[in-house]
Structures are given as C-alpha cells and as structure tokens.
Amino acid sequence: MTDERLKEAGLTDAQIAAFRKLECEGCCSAQVRMLRDVRNELLDNIHGYEKIVCNLDLVLHELQKKEEAWKR
C-alpha cells in the first residue's frame, strides 16, 4: 500500500512514518492496531460533527417556528 493510500485513509505524515517503521520491523499486528486507532479517532470526529449538525438543525427549526409565529 502506498503512502498516498495511507494519506487518503486519514493518516498524517507522522503516522505514515510510524506505520512504515512498524512495517520494517514486521509488526503487522501493531500496524492493524494503529489503523484501528486512526479509524476510531475519525469516527469520533464524525460523531462529534454529526452532533453539531443536529444541534444546528434544532436551532434552525426553532428559528423557523419563531418566524412563522411572527407572521401570524
């Protein structure tokens, strides 16, 4: 797998270097752990942004309801 593929998968340059070091050492299980850690971090970020979007949707909904009430 190329560095470009690892970068596209969300790894930083430092993480790619660490991944390559583990590869040279033949530590496949450590590489798997590292990739799972990166994946979990990305999912945590996604869930955090999802929560922000939901809160924004609530604020927009409340504002729209308020706007409709003023029109009446």
Image (cartoon, grey):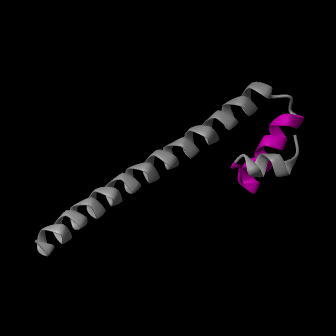
| Whether residue 23 is situated above or below residue 13 in the rendered picture | above
Q: Residue 6: give x, y in percent of width and height.
A: 78, 46
Q: How many marks?
A: 0
State the image coordinates of residue 48 (x, y, percent, origin top left): 44, 50
| The quadrant where residue 18 appears | top right
- Relative side of 59 to 66, left or right: right
Task: Name the residue: 36% across, 52% down.
Answer: 54
Tell me the quadrant of the picture where the C terminus can be found. bottom left
Q: Which residues are magenta?
A: 10-24
In the image, residue 34 above or below residue 15: above
Could you tell whether 19 is left or right of 55 in the image?
right
Horizontal side, residue 27 vs residue 62: left or right: right
Q: Position of residue 37 (x, y in %)?
A: 61, 37
**Residue at figure coordinates x 78%, y 41% from the top left:** 19
Residue plotted at (38% across, 56% down): 52
Above-or-below relation of 13 to 30: below
Task: Residue at 72%, 48% (x, y): give it.
Answer: 15
Residue at far bottom of view: 71
Q: Is residue 46 magenta?
A: no
Farthest-out residue, front = 72
Q: Residue furthest top?
A: 29
Quadrant the N terminus occupies: top right
Q: Which is the main secondary structure of the residues drawn in magenta? A: helix
